[in-house]
């Protein structure tokens, strides 16, 4: 999951002429963003635990 993947999906959706395809690409972008946020959150929690 990465921010760059989310950006790529969003850009492809913006260029799409097909509304169904655009919606699917935006859904993928949202899932990528959610995954990136979760990964970042897990890293922050891990760092905070390590600091004690």
Image: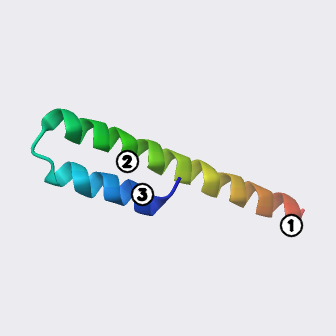
Q: Which residue is mark 2?
A: 29
Quick check: marks 2 and 1 in contact, CB under 8 Å? no
Residue in the picture at 42% in, 57% down:
5
Left or right of 7? Residue 3 is right
Q: Residue 17: x and y, percent? A: 9, 45
Badge 1 crowding class, 10 Å Cα cut-off, few under 14, some 14 to 19, many 20 or more, is few
Q: Secondary structure at mark 3?
A: helix
- Measure how far apart labels 3 and 1 are at the Cα level: 31 Å
Residue in the picture at 55% in, 52% down:
37
Q: Which mark is residue 5?
A: 3
Badge 2 crowding class, 10 Å Cα cut-off, few under 14, some 14 to 19, many 20 or more, is many
Residue in the picture at 19% in, 33% down:
20
Q: Residue furthest left?
A: 17
Which of the image's four quarters has the C terminus?
A: bottom right
Q: Residue 22: x and y, percent? A: 21, 41
Q: Secondary structure at mark 2?
A: helix
Left or right of 24? Residue 18 is left
């Amino acid at each position: 999951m990465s921010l760059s993947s989310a950006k790529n999906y969003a850009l492809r959706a913006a260029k799409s002429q097909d509304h169904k395809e655009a919606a699917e690409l935006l859904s993928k972008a949202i899932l990528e963003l959610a995954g990136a946020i979760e990964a970042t959150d897990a890293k922050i929690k891990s760092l905070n635990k390590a600091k004690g």
